[in-house]
Amino acid sequence: MDTQELISRLAVALGIGLVIGLERGWRRRRAGPGNRTAGIRTFAVSGLLGGVTGALAQVLSAQASAGNLAAGVLLGLALAAYAGVIALFSREENRALGTFSATTAIAAIVTFALGAYAVLGDMRVAAGAAIAVTALLAAREELHGWVERITWPELRSGVVLLAMTFIALPILPDDPIGPFGGVKPREVWIIAIVLAGVSFLGYAAVKYFGARRGLLLASVAGGLASSTAVAVTNARRAAAGEGSHRILAAGVAVASAIMFLRIVAIVAALNPPLLLFVAPPLLAAAVTALGCAIVWAFRQKGDEGERHARFRNPFDFWSVVGFALFLAAVIVLGRAIGETLGATGAVVGAIAVGLADVDAVTVSMAQLAPATLSAPQAALAILGAAAGGTVSKAAISAAIGRGTFAAETVAMAAGCLAIGTVALWATFAFIAQQP
């Protein structure tokens, strides 16, 4: 490491101490000199001290055969000595103030460690971690208030969702299992995570933004990931009597519109010539779905929708896993149909796979045209997948949600299919008339 790079890294170490010390100093800004363990100056020096210690360890590592061991010992002893000093002064400050907190001591130790890492490792990671630490420290009141308000079902569901994402997902195999290309266990688990995440998002949005705004915002976000997940979640809410059926149906309509627009965006990115075939029917269907959503969302009398929105649980683990397995089986079935029937089967298989995964069909078909499939064939397969996804929402609503929710969701799906079909017919008629 040359001198210029070392100076840059030490400057980052100093900056780490300054940014964390700024928050700590502001927090204790009313304490007079000598009445606090560490402020902006102490934290700045701590970050620089960590950087200097890292630089010394690097020198030791480069000079002797046992340099790595010596460097490790130096870093360990320096960190232990620094932690001991900070812990001692933090204890005395707690005694003087009559408080019980280790935040300042832990923040100071982290500052020292990040300062050392800025010299020995990736400066960008060290700086990013320092910003994250500062943000956590600054959000103390918000975090404490959130912890006070959270319920046990919310905490349990949040922990389960985090475990599904960060513990189970990385260890699941990514090799396909089964015939016709099979299905990857990791992909099935991702479907389960999306289902659980959309349900949790809807729960949180309703709790903090109210029924109408919360459900619509959650449906927009959920539709970007999986409109089918939104349909499953809202159907279960409707069946359990948790929320206004019309607002829940409006959420499915919004997610459906997002699905249609998402397909248009994917085709535009991968195969723009196909837009001539797929954009008119998809945009017509999106407008139809949005129209239904607007009508249903604002047909509530007074606060009727708000009064009925009382979700009991963010999501049920076994139900989302079971439905993910069902969708995986549908995907395998669609692939089997596509491989068995050839070019014609591409459209039929796309419809079947579209019941569960519209994006995968859109990406694959957009890449096949015009080399393997003609543009009209690829467009019909993509539109078939969109139709399959729309039919699946109607079927889910009828099978799970029932009542007003099912009736309005089925009506929305039928309207999208009808208007989309008319737009498709008009598009092909227009193309056929061109020279």
Image (tube, grey):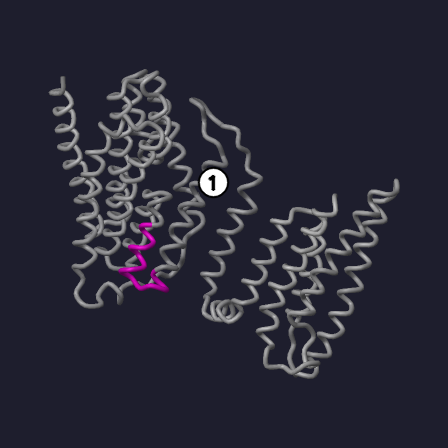
Hey, which residue is sitting farthest front in the picture?
4
Q: Who is closer to the viewer here, 346 or 95?
A: 95
Q: Who is closer to the viewer here, 57 or 344?
A: 57
The percent position of residue 367, horizontal first and vertical second, equals 37, 24
> Mainly helix, strand or loop, the magenta region?
helix
**Mark 1 crowdedness (10 Å alpha carbons): few <14, some 14-19, many ≥20:** many
The percent position of residue 101, horizontal first and vertical second, equals 64, 73
Q: Who is closer to the viewer here, 267 or 2?
A: 2
Q: Is residue 101 left or right of residue 301?
A: right
- Per the rendered image, the range of residues in magenta is 206-220
Q: Quadrant of residue 87?
A: bottom right
Report the number of discs. 1
For badge 1, the amino acid type reads Trp
Residue 114 in sight from this viewpoint: no
User: Is 213 inside the magenta-drawn segment?
Assistant: yes
Which residue is located at x 64 percent, y 49 percent?
Answer: 123
**SS at mark 1 in the image:** helix
Which residue is located at x 42 percent, y 49 percent?
Answer: 196
